[in-house]
Image (cartoon, rainbow, N blue to C red):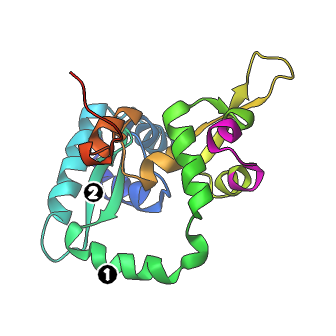
Amino acid sequence: MPNHNITRHIEALVFSSSQSIGTQEIILALNAVFNEEFTEVQVLESVEQIKEKYSHVDFAIELVFLNNGYQFLTKKDYHETVNQLQLHRSKKKLSQAAMETLAIIAYRQPITKLEIEQIRGVNSDYSVQRLLEKELISIDGKAETPGRPILYSTSTLFMDYFGLNNLNQLPQLKDIVKEENTVGENVE
């Protein structure tokens, strides 16, 4: 096999991808460009080289395995600085209603808009629309109930945005609810 520096090509693929990019996607791109068959082992070796390169203190970013793929993210030392930028971009911020709707979808997916509204107790048209526009949720088919309402689920962008590899990493209710927040006596 000719000696291509696939490490730089993989670095460019990860950098240019707006979402995490999986090993298979990387292999497909490399195979198409070089008209060769690259293996997962070759890609993983290059990924390790990229990780090692960006682990150096001179870089503010690092290569992270996230949502079954790779993505460049800011190192923890710079989170506060980046957070300040995000605070100034308030139009990108989700409203309380949108956050509530997103949480319901994340924990109960796939779910219909009617089910969301029954849980929230208010109309959720605007929140669902905003979440679709921001690509944090996606349409996941139609329910097998009368009227065949649309089912909503979280998107891969949701996984990337919240730094999750899978939905099992969402906080569980027992992790969030504190005993001092309960009403009544705790009977065992």
Above or below 166: residue 103: below
Identified at 36% across, 54% down, the residue is: 71
- Magenta residues span 116-127
Which quadrant holds residue 85?
Answer: bottom left
Residue 146 seen from this side: yes
**Residue type pointed to by label 2:** Leu
Q: Main secondary structure of the magenta part?
A: helix
Mark sitting earlier along the chain (1/2): 2
Q: Nearer the viewer, residue 60 or 115?
A: 115
Identified at 48% across, 56% down, the residue is: 17
Q: Secondary structure at mark 2?
A: strand
Residue 6 at x, y percent in the picture: 32, 51
**Residue type pointed to by label 1:** Thr
In the shown orientation, is residue 80 left or right of residue 156?
left
> Given contact means CB atoms under 8 Å apart, are the residues at marks 1 and 2 in contact?
no
Q: Residues within 10 Å of mark 1 (few under 14, many from 20)?
A: few
The residue singled out by tag 1 in the image is 81
The image quadrant where one finds the C terminus is top left
Q: Of the numbered discs in the image, which one, if any, rests on residue 22?
A: none
The residue singled out by tag 2 in the image is 63
Q: Nearer the viewer, residue 44 or 3?
A: 44
